[in-house]
Image (cartoon, grey):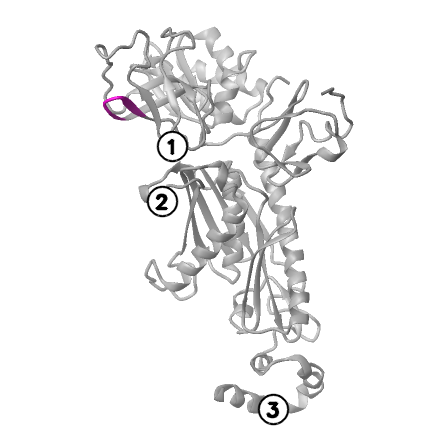
Amino acid sequence: MVFEREAETTLACGAQTSFRSRRRRTQRHISPSVRLILRMEYVSPEGLRLDGRRPMEMRQIRAEIGAVSKADGSAIFEMGNTKVIAAVYGPREVQNRSQISNHALVRCEYSMANFSTGDRMRKSKGDRRSTEISLVIRQTMEASILTHLLPRSQIDIYVQVLQADGGTRSACINAATLALADAGIPMRDLVTSCSAGYLNSTSLLDLNYVEDSAGGPDVTLGILPKLDKVTLLQMDSKLPIDILENVMQLAIEGCKAIANYIREILLENTKQLEYRRGV
Amino acid sequence: METKPSSYSTNLVDQLVCPGDVVLDLSSMTNQTIKLGGGLRQDCDSISAMKAGRLSFSKPNKYWVENSQKRYVPHAGDSILGIVVDSRSDNFLVDIKGPAIAFLPVLAFEGGTRRNIPRFEIGTLLYVRVVKANPGMNPELSCTDATGKAAEFGALKDGYMFECTTGLSRRLLSSPTCPVLDALGKKISFEIAVGLNGRVWVNATSPQTTIIVANAIMNSETLSDAQQRIMVEKLLKRIQ
């Protein structure tokens, strides 16, 4: 709390002249913690972000199916500089006999390559962050997999971040979806995920690392695009409810754009593999 | 119930579909019976795909999604290649690339009695038939055909086994004969056993021929008919 107040005062004296008009406009609905990040300019007066994107612009996405030949299904998914590889094994025999049930057991393991971030860090395998993200990915994928069709079996999803530049959670979910579809696992719909944030009183789609570490609100959303259902909604920091709706709407648009792309890639891949039978 | 061709129902046939795509709308096709095959599911009033592949239709009323994957989903009646992983007193445990280990009863052989139980080492390759594939229990295999005859089923000795996708193995078994096998068969003689679970076993008199056949089949996956014939010719030039 003390820190927040201090930040507020620095803001008040330091940026008084140049930011006065803008601050007056935004002060009404912004909490003090959000005001702190106003010190840095994430959206230029021309309406461009730090990496030159427009607020509602997504980074370039690229996907590739079949990256791991030994896996039953695999994919690489890139969102700008974020690059993720996913491999799916299964449905296969349950390894732990006590976990056999009438539904398929979905397991997920998330890891970050040591070389994925700028400063090379050696992280232990089961740290809190990766355990949490593994859980998030598992729950999101479980919502779309028709687990009741595969009783007494196990599906393993391994995702690894090769390059991290914000939005790894979303990229992992998108990669996992593609890998599952490649493995031919029955699914309700293709889950897609995208993040959105709110900085400098602008809604921003698909935050990169710098925007992500600004400490502002960061909404990660996962949807089933055909069924119009939300399977994942996470947010860091605080956001007024009316703005949340705008930000979420933006994230939904992002998810749908990704869904279209993933669909195209998947159809392209099936076309290549498909054969003419009796034609 | 009477079946009449509905204009909507033929819309997506022979098109590529993705998981979640609504394929058929049941509310617009009343008084009609349809049969659903693999890769489709009913969700209230709509039929949607749950796998990526090509939607196929067979007269009068069967719909399914034709896809290709590395794992096998067991169905009763399929002929497959399995590998023995363990033997128990009453069953052999066989790996069939499926979601669960399959059981091959020790008596499921032609004239099988308690007296003449066959001995299979771990790792033996078997050509077997799926007899039961019920959800919630391990699939059951048999080394006899429906009439109880051995009919080609049993252990495969020598030769070479490789794995491919289920799509490729289905294509190898389709009629008229798949172009690769047709082209190969005109020039050289070899034995082949194709399992619907994506395992193919090849045997020939010389190792070179076996390798050529195996390579030709593995290459043929993404080639068209004409390309397959050209590829086979190129490969065969090397051993002549």
Amino acid marked by disc 2: Gln
Q: Position of residue B134 (x, y in %)?
A: 45, 27
Q: CA distance from mark 1 to mark 3?
A: 66 Å
Q: CA distance from mark 2 to mark 1?
A: 14 Å
- Residue A96 visible, this orientation: no
Task: From the image, tell me which residue sits under label 2.
Answer: A99
Q: Are marks 2 and 1 in contact (CB under 8 Å)?
A: no
Q: Main secondary structure of the magenta part?
A: strand
Task: From the image, tell me which residue sits under label 1.
Answer: B100
Q: Relative to B44, say whether B130 is above or below.
A: above
Q: Are marks 3 and 2 on the same chain?
A: yes
**Which region is colored magenta?**
B86-93
Identified at 49% across, 32% down, the residue is: B69
> The numbered mark 3 sits on a residue in which chain?
A
Q: Element under label 2?
A: helix
Q: Residue furthest right?
A: B7
Tell me the mark number nearer the camera, choosing from 3 and 2: 2
Q: Nearer the viewer, residue A112 or B133?
A: B133
Q: Element under label 1?
A: loop
